[in-house]
Structure formats: C-alpha cells, structure tokens
Amino acid sequence: MPELDIVTASSAETEELAARVARELRPGDVVLLRGDLGAGKTTFVRGACRALGITRPVTSPTFTIAHRYVGEGIDVSHLDLYRFQSVEPEEWGALEPYLDGATCFVEWPDAGEGFLPAARLELDFRHIDPEHRGITLRSAEASLLQRLSGC
Ligand code: ADP
Ligand code: MG
C-alpha cells in the first residue's frame, strides 16, 4: 500500500498534520491509529476535531470506548478499543451507530478487525524523542498521500 512518512517536532505539528488530513475527510471515512501509549494518537484526533470546528475537549475515550462530536458540516466519532481483546457482535452493535454518517477515528483498532469497514487511511505513530514523533500514513489512494505530503 502507498505510504508517507512524516516526522513532527511538537504536538502542535501533529495537530497541524491532522488538520490537513481532516480537510480531506468525508462522512463514512474510517481512519485507524496505531502506536504505543503516548505516541500521539489522541493528539492527532484532537487536531482533526479542531480543524472541523469542534471546540469541546477531545480526550482518549479509553474508558468510555466512544465519543461522537458534531463539527461544522460533519460529525466526528472517536473510538478507542484499547480495552478489548476482541469485540463481540453485541458490543459491535453498540459501536456501529458511531460510524453512521460520521468520519470515524479508531485508536487500537485491531480488536475491531472483521467489524470495522475498510479504512481510508491508516496511521502508525512511534516515539522518536520527547518532542518528536514518526507518523507513517498508509492509504490505497496514492493521490491522497500525495496531497498530504504537500507536493
Ligand atoms: P496516545 O493517544 O497515542 O496514547 P496522546 O496523544 O494522548 O497519545 O499523548 C501524546 C503525548 O505526547 C502528549 O502529552 C503530547 O503533548 C506529547 N507529545 C510530544 N511531542 C509530540 C508530538 N510530536 N506529537 C504528538 N504528541 C506529542
Ligand atoms: Mg489515546
């Protein structure tokens, strides 16, 4: 799959990258975010939400599993499957409405495999040092990555 590697030097830079991504997203798009705790996944989702006019606090839904925010012309859902080994069908029944008519960001998505629709974008976050993060973006849409790379 085509991929793009970006290094950000601050959480603000990660939020700026997320804002560029957010402007490309449409309802129904799913974005998967993988990487260790503290690698910047929630920071990225916050940046996307801010760019879409969502002013409410954006925090990890680790304990609540899912949040849905109403943005300017678009709803954004934020799922965090950290607490799941695997998702049972009845649990998925409760989560699926979050995907309806929204752009959906999913942290720790692997437990949702088999339930989650194909992702438009998959992101891998890694620590480089306290302020730097490596972010690998993968998408079947090479043109999307090209626009995000700024070339
Ligand atoms: P995750 O959701 O992956 O567990 P968070 O986004 O909640 O991670 O936390 C990332 C932490 O790392 C925040 O405290 C953030 O301020 C800090 N940080 C430092 N540098 C960066 C960077 N370049 N990108 C994103 N977050 C960063
Ligand atoms: Mg998080």
Image (cartoon, rainbow, N blue to C red):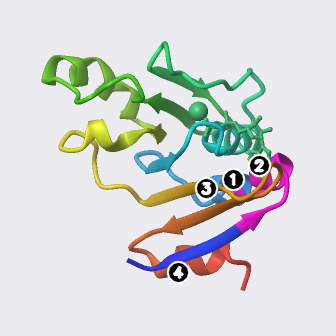
Report whether 25 appears left or right of 132.
left
Q: Residues within 10 Å of mark 1 (few under 14, many from 20)?
A: many
**Which badge, 4 or 3, is on the more N-terminal residue?**
3
Residue at x 28%, y 48% (from the top left corner): 117
Secondary structure under tag 2 reads helix
* Label pair 1/2, CB-CB below 8 angstroms: yes
The residue sitting at 66% across, 24% down in the picture is 59
Q: What span is colored magenta in the figure? A: 7-17
Query: Residue 76 location, x and y as percent?
Result: 55, 35
Look at the numbered disc 1 and give the secondary structure of its residue: helix
Q: Quadrant of residue 8?
A: bottom right
Identify the residue under disc 1.
Answer: 18
Above or below residue 140? Residue 99 is above
* Kind of residue at badge 2: Glu
Of pointers 4 and 1, the one earlier in the residue sequence = 1
- Does any atom of ligand 1 lie closer than 8 Å to the CB of label 2? yes
Query: How far apart in space, not on screen, are marks 4 and 3 (Cα)?
Result: 24 Å
Q: Earlier in the sequence, mark 2 or mark 4?
A: 2
Q: Nearer the viewer, residue 134 or 149?
A: 134
Q: Earlier in the sequence, mark 3 or mark 2?
A: 2
> Mark on residue 126?
3
Residue type at mark 3?
Arg
Q: Quadrant of the C terminus?
A: bottom right
Vertical comparison of 75 with 5: above or below: above
Q: From the image, tell me which residue sits under label 2.
A: 15
Q: Nearer the viewer, mark 4 or mark 3?
A: 3
Q: Amino acid at mark 1?
A: Ala
Residue 147 got which mark? none
Q: Magenta stretch containing residue 122, yes or no?
A: no
Residue occupying the far top of the picture: 64
